[in-house]
Amino acid sequence: MSQLNLLFIKINRLFNRFLNQKLIKICIYVSLITFLPGLLIGVLIAYFFGPESYNVIDNYISDLGSISYTPAPFILDAIAMTTACFLVPIFFYITKIIVSETKSIIFNSNESIFKRIYCINIDLLAFFGLLSLLSGAVGLFGIGLFSEDRTTELGLHYTFSIIIFAGLAFGALFNGIAVLFKLKKTMFPRFLGLYMMVGPFIVSILFLFPPNSVIRPFLEWMMLLAAFLWLIPESFLILKNFKSTSTYTG
């Protein structure tokens, strides 16, 4: 057995210990229960009790973290930092699913060289997707730590805002390509991979070059929605797979 193959086996064992079903379930449930309800509560408080009558058409998401728009800016800060931490294992697990079974082809000398190189490219896409998603998690943590009111002279809040949306957009793009073109299907359907390739990236481009009739704060909310439209389905598909696996083994 080659040293490279042995290294991959050790890494795989480490991942399997770290990315167990119980941990991933906890991370998914905490992320869903924390971010979505917390965001809704933050919007309602800002709308009814904020001095500026907050709304999702005219206000950026980050405004929920400023005392100028809401009496409870700590809500966005808390849910952003908490969710960012619990998303990290989920992102690793998504990558694990995408690259599943590729190593059996890559290290199989009986497979054609074209097929092996093809699988290496799928793994590289998943790897770059993971790096992008992890940077998105860093950005999400950063916007909570450095809110609009604590942005500092360096403008760290704005910087982390760019990191989170760029990370999620490129993460969706790379992983979407991998899901769509992988030789063997994963639990993620190919049409979801197609959406991940196209949806978030188009909305991000629109945010950078907004049409005259659409303002950027609304497009920022659309970028968040575009991320939800693949992150939430993937989370439920993972939970569904856990349930079917436990039912089968039971």
Image: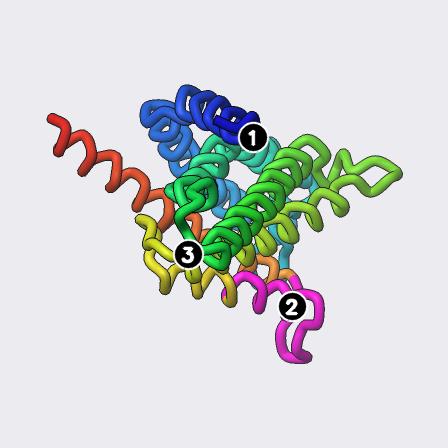
- Visual colour scheme: rainbow
Question: Is residue 49 among what the camera can see?
Answer: no
Callout 2: helix, strand or loop?
helix
Give SS at disc 1. Answer: helix
- Label 2 and label 3: CA atoms lie apart by 26 Å
Give the magenta-colored segment's residue range.
199-216
Q: Earlier in the sequence, mark 3 or mark 1?
A: 1
Q: Residue at x 30, y 46 (%)?
A: 237
In the rendered image, which residue does mark 1 sit on? 4
Quadrant in which residue 140 is drawn: top right
Q: Name the residue: 54% across, 61% down.
A: 200
Q: Position of residue 145 (x, y in %)?
A: 68, 31
Against 151, is 117 above or below?
below
- Taking depth in this image into account, of 30 and 95 the one nearest to the observer is 95
- Which residue lies under the disc numbered 3? 182
Vertical comparison of 214 with 94: above or below:
below
Residues tagged 3 and 1 counted as in contact (Cβ below 8 A): no
Checking the image for residue 205, the label placed there is 2
* Quadrant of the image occupied by residue 182: bottom left
Residue in the foreground of this view, choosing between 63 and 174: 174
Which percent across, then down, holds residue 123?
52, 47
Residue drawn at point x = 48 percent, y = 46 percent: 44
Q: Position of residue 121 (x, y in %)?
A: 55, 53
> Label 1 neighbourhood size at 10 Å, few (<14), some (14-19), many (20+)?
few
Cα separation, mark 3 vs mark 1, equals 23 Å
> What is the chief secondary structure element of the magenta stretch?
helix
Q: Amino acid at mark 3?
A: Lys
Name the residue nearer the viewer: 46 or 241: 241
User: In this rendering, is residue 15 above or below 212?
Assistant: above
Amino acid type at image mark 2 = Ile
